[in-house]
Image (tube, grey):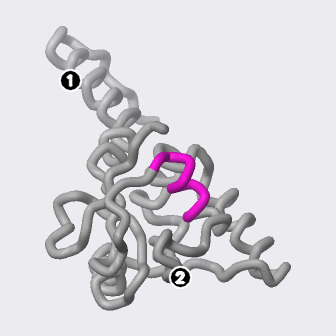
């Protein structure tokens, strides 16, 4: 049986504590770097958190100019998707998927397009009118950033 040696110095202990804190708070840090992005055709420049949630849960399906909203998201297992759901929508990815399934099966809405990478998500947003999604701010180049207000 392997033995784990005791931490012998304060610096080793400090390093361990710091690494544990980093791991514990990394989704929060990731969510803070996440921005909501939209196609250039979208005339909205900001949304409240409530409006953002309505869009991503399928309850708001048209922009103010009447254009259909197309939602694009990453796969449920993607770290950025998990952080976006928790921090911006205040729900878990599985809860969001259930809402989409209910809307789709009842005929009241359409499931968002799911992609496997941020690059694919941004490409779809750039090429499809009325599209909204999210991405790491470092990945955003030509897409329109939508500011999210508290209320």
Identify the residue position indicated by label 2 in the image.
Answer: 68
- Residue shown at the point (40%, 42%) measured from the top left: 149
Sequence order check, earlier mark of 1 and 2: 1
Residue 25: where, in percent of width, then height? 37, 34
Considering every residue shown, the one lying at the far right of the view is 106
Q: Residue 62 lies in what quarter of the image?
A: bottom right
Circle 2 packing at 10 Å, graded few (<14), some (14-19), many (20+), is some
Q: In the drawing, does residue 57 fall left or right of residue 151?
A: right
Along the line of sight, the residue nearer the viewer: 63 or 70: 63
Question: Magenta segment, which residues?
Answer: 48-55
Residue 54 located within the stretch drawn in magenta: yes
Mark closer to the observer (1, 2)? 2
Compared with residue 84, is residue 115 higher up or lower down, i.e. above or below? below
Along the line of sight, the residue nearer the viewer: 109 or 76: 109
Q: In the drawing, does residue 88 fall left or right of residue 57?
A: left
Q: Are marks 1 and 2 in contact (CB under 8 Å)?
A: no
Residue 147: where, in percent of width, then height? 32, 52
- Secondary structure, magenta segment, majority class: helix
Element assignment for label 2? loop
């Amino acid at each position: 049986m392997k033995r784990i040696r005791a931490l012998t110095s304060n610096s080793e202990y400090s390093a361990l504590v710091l690494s544990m804190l980093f791991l514990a708070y990394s989704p929060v840090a990731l969510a803070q770097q996440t921005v909501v992005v939209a196609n250039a055709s979208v005339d909205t420049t900001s949304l409240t958190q409530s409006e953002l949630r309505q869009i991503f849960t399928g309850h708001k399906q048209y922009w103010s100019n009447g254009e259909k909203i197309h939602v694009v998201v990453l796969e449920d297992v993607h770290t950025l998707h998990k952080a976006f759901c928790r921090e911006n929508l205040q729900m878990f990815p599985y809860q969001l998927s259930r809402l989409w399934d209910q809307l789709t099966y009842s005929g009241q809405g359409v499931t968002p397009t799911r992609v496997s990478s941020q690059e694919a998500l941004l490409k779809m947003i750039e090429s499809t009118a009325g599209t909204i999604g999210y991405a790491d701010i470092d990945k955003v180049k030509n897409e329109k950033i939508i500011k999210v207000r508290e209320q």
